[in-house]
Image: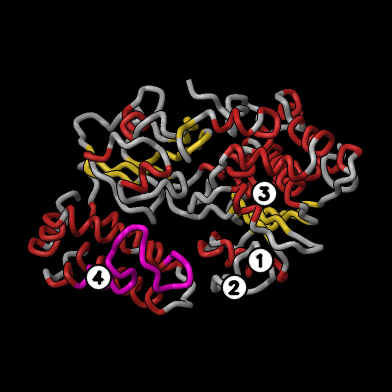
Amino acid sequence: MTERIVGARLGYGDSETLSRFLATGGDQGLRRAVLEMRPEEVADEVTTANLLGRGGAGFEAGRKWSMLRKAPRRYLVINGDESEPATFKDHLLVERDPHQLVEGATIAAYAIGASLVVIYLRGEFALGLERVQQAINEAYARNALGRSIFGSSFSVDILLQPGAGAYICGEETSLIESLEGKRGFPRIKPPYFPAVIGLYGEPTIVNNVETVSNLPWIVQHGGAAFKALGEGRSTGTRLFALSGQVQRPGPYEVEMTKITFRDLIYGKEYGQGLHPDRSLIAFIPGGVSAPWFFPENLDIPLGQDEVAKAGSMLGSGSVIVMDDSSCPVRSAWRIARFFARESCGQCTPCREGGAWIDKILRRIEEGEGREADLDLLLDLCDNISPGIKWPPAQTTICVLGPSIPPSVSAAVNHFRDDFLVHIKEGRCPHA
């Protein structure tokens, strides 16, 4: 049985309340950090834990913190703008354990010497926004936030900021632009690495909700205990959002590398397999921006490097299952349409290429396509991300553009017959 870390309270019906939080070890990590440890000792524990970011890129949190430029003022931004389709693990933590998020953010602020924390939440998380704000208010009331936290010399404030529904603001520099009151355009890196030039031009760390939610446990139990879970670079546990054509979709916290995609999809304690008389045709291992996997990839462990070696990524922690009732043409079109609509428009390959791919896939799905469209789709994908490889080649400021080709190329290359039926017969074989 996987030891739960970020999901330890989720079995309780009142997990979001302060009383349940305090009754299950809440504040103990923060108290130990600010009363018994120096900031650098907290950072060292996170480095020892080898906590990888749980948002997308999987960069080591401790290493990220170590890159902060020395300055009198530093900021911490918590990225809760979880806007990718079928990704809902952070949404769960925000609604069901907001006090853990606030505690983890405060610990991170102490470790890096931040003078202000901003929690940026997706604006559609109405209940989550309400509960996080209540958790912040209750933290101030018990001196877990504000001046001289728990009688220590450390003081910090947390500001909650709702987003306006732009997926691009999940990219850390776009998020910072949004916080500064500007349009959510990604910044060019370098020079705008947030750890060097971030919010208001000051050094800034951006971590996501699940990443900082691990910190209370790490401080209480030690980085070595966290590292003992998992294997290699993939340490600790991770929440996966399982969706699609499985019998029991939902969020599952698993020890990294210790189970495979087959276990997650078919295991009795997890997805419980596909619906009767259905067979697997593909699954997406890390959100809709990740290259697709196929039945031959089922036995790959859920580990950062293991998935990367196979040509994809764990990304946002969203595992989407497609069975033989799914139309790969429609699936690729929906994904491409999402990215085309969410493009900020700053970069030509993304703005123009995404829009054209959306239009071509739409006409194929609607029975108006041509055989030449298949080569045209791959040519457009190659223009957005040369070589259509993973990790992708960059022709754009951020990775939204290169997130379009993986699903399109996977569908065209692996399900060409489905495309030809759409084109030659003017119908969807899965309708």
The type of colouring in the image is secondary structure
Residue 344, position in %: x, y?
49, 72
Which amino acid does the dot numbered 1 rest on? Val
Which amino acid does the dot numbered 3 rest on? Leu
Q: Nearer the viewer, mark 1 or mark 4?
A: 1
Which amino acid does the dot numbered 2 rest on? Pro
Q: Earlier in the sequence, mark 3 or mark 1?
A: 3
Q: Residues within 10 Å of mark 4 (few under 14, many from 20)?
A: some
Q: Earlier in the sequence, mark 2 or mark 3?
A: 3
Give me the C-alpha separation between circle 2 and circle 1: 8 Å
Q: Residue at x 48, y 72 (%)?
A: 397
Would residue 174 be counted in the magenta stretch?
no
Residue to which mark 4 is pinned: 360
Q: Earlier in the sequence, mark 2 or mark 4?
A: 2
Q: Give the SS element for disc 1.
A: loop
Residue 204, position in %: x, y?
68, 60
Residue to which mark 3 is pinned: 129
Q: Earlier in the sequence, mark 1 or mark 4?
A: 1
| Whether residue 116 is situated above or below residue 258 in the rendered picture | below
Q: Residues within 10 Å of mark 2 (few under 14, many from 20)?
A: few
